[in-house]
Amino acid sequence: MNTVPSQAGPSATGYQGRVSRQALEQLVHVRGEGDEWDFKRTLGDLADNAARVNLAKDALAFCNLPTGGTLVVGVDSDYMRTGLNAGDHIDTTAIRKAIEKYIDGDFIVLAAEHLLVEDGERESKRYGIVYLARRSIQPVLAAQDGHIANSKSPLFRSGDILIRRGAASIRANSGDVRRLLTSTVVQEEKVRAVNELWASVLDQRRLLSGIEFLYDILADSEYKLVITRPELSAARGHITPGDLASKIDELQLRVSVVRPHIPNGLYQQYRLCAAFLGRIQLKAIRQRDAGIFVSWTDSDDESPDLILRQMASQLLSNDEVDAVWNGQVSGIGTRRPLRPAIDATERGLLEVIEGVLSGLA
């Protein structure tokens, strides 16, 4: 697996809930605009310059919010839920095309339409919901002036940083810019910390590479071959328990340096994954030195490793844990491949990482 991108949040697919029917239903009944949402009767004809500039102004401001912002389309200035006009269409590609030339910085735009039926009415109405957020940590700037025909001055100028203040999208003042840039520095530190944590997990897994290979190819009846066949025995490596402890201590030290920037939930998940990998590795070293080899799910005396199973139950679903411990039965014995189990624990860790980064995008 690759290192987590150093400056990017999750992919757009991670934000699909922002434009879901449930999200629309929650917002459409709100009376009042806020920093993170706004209502519009219509987006207008996006082939028209004025409509594009007005939408770009809101997009620039929403993208400078830590978690982005949402436009609800089909609600007028008095919060009357009118629905979309027959000719209105809320389309991600059209919206991006309309505003991208005004935005200096990579951004996410998602849009959807949903049908809602008002209480006491039989006919449904169409509404639009548009989510906008910057993809990187750095603030976005206006890439060019936002001119509107017959207007004395542009709505925004090239290089402007726009922010949300209540229901308004406005130019940031010096204090706003200072706070935004300070926040950006803090967020960059968090992303650097997450990268270091993830890299440490990958480095610890590399220590397991030979053992992982053996557990993946052998059934339980074949474990004694590891001792008698040199090419298999060599895969168990030569690292001593002391060497392993030293290497893991180095990884822990790397993470401890950036610990202040790692949310506690993510840090605890990391520690659990590290302990899971470390127990398997130490068990393999101990078995190698004792001249035995048994399933990684078992203790040295071939009884179930209950401590390891308890760790696994905190990292994997019950079905995944049961599948691992039951193994894959074949004519030569039961195989319990290690790689899929570790992959599953790392996916869980990546989900927590994605949750952390989604608040930074």
Image: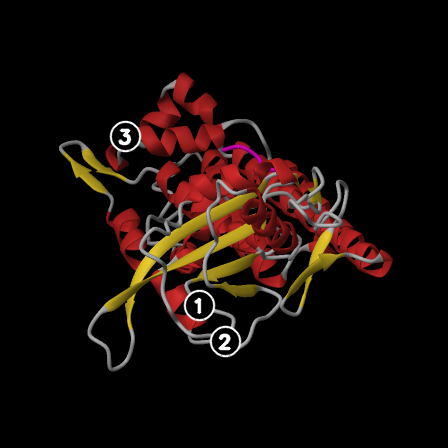
Write down the region rendered in magenta.
1-6
Amino acid found under the numbered disc labelled 3: Glu
Asked if residue 124 is positioned above or below residue 151 in the image, the reply reads below
Mark 3 is surrounded, within 10 Å at the Cα level, by few (under 14), some (14 to 19) or many (20 or more) other residues, namely some
Amino acid found under the numbered disc labelled 2: Asp
- Rounded to the nearest whole Å, what is the CA distance between mark 2 and mark 1? 8 Å
Q: Secondary structure of the magenta portion, mostly? A: loop
Judging from the image, what secondary structure is the residue with disc 3 in? helix
**Farthest residue in the top direction?**
231
In depth, the one of 214 and 39 nearer the eye is 39
Q: Which residue is mark 1?
A: 75
Q: Earlier in the sequence, mark 2 or mark 3?
A: 2
In depth, the one of 10 and 257 nearer the eye is 10
Going by the image, does 285 lie left or right of 344?
right
Look at 66% across and 53% down and name the residue there. Answer: 64
Look at 47% across and 74% down and name the residue there. Answer: 79
- Rounded to the nearest whole Å, what is the CA distance between mark 2 and mark 3? 75 Å
Name the front one of labels 2 and 3.
2
Amino acid found under the numbered disc labelled 1: Val
- Residue 332 in the image: state x and y as whole percent: 17, 31
Asked if residue 278 is positioned above or below residue 115 in the image, the reply reads above
Q: Which residue is mark 3?
A: 222
Instruction: Kindly indicate whether the residue at mark 3 contacts the one at mark 2 (C-beta within 8 angstroms).
Output: no
| Mark count | 3
Mark 2 is surrounded, within 10 Å at the Cα level, by few (under 14), some (14 to 19) or many (20 or more) other residues, namely few
Going by the image, does 300 lie left or right of 318?
right
- Residue 81 in the image: state x and y as whole percent: 39, 72
Q: Which residue is mark 2?
A: 78
Judging from the image, what secondary structure is the residue with disc 1 in? loop
Going by the image, does 347 lie left or right of 105?
left
Asked if residue 108 is positioned above or below residue 235 in the image, the reply reads below
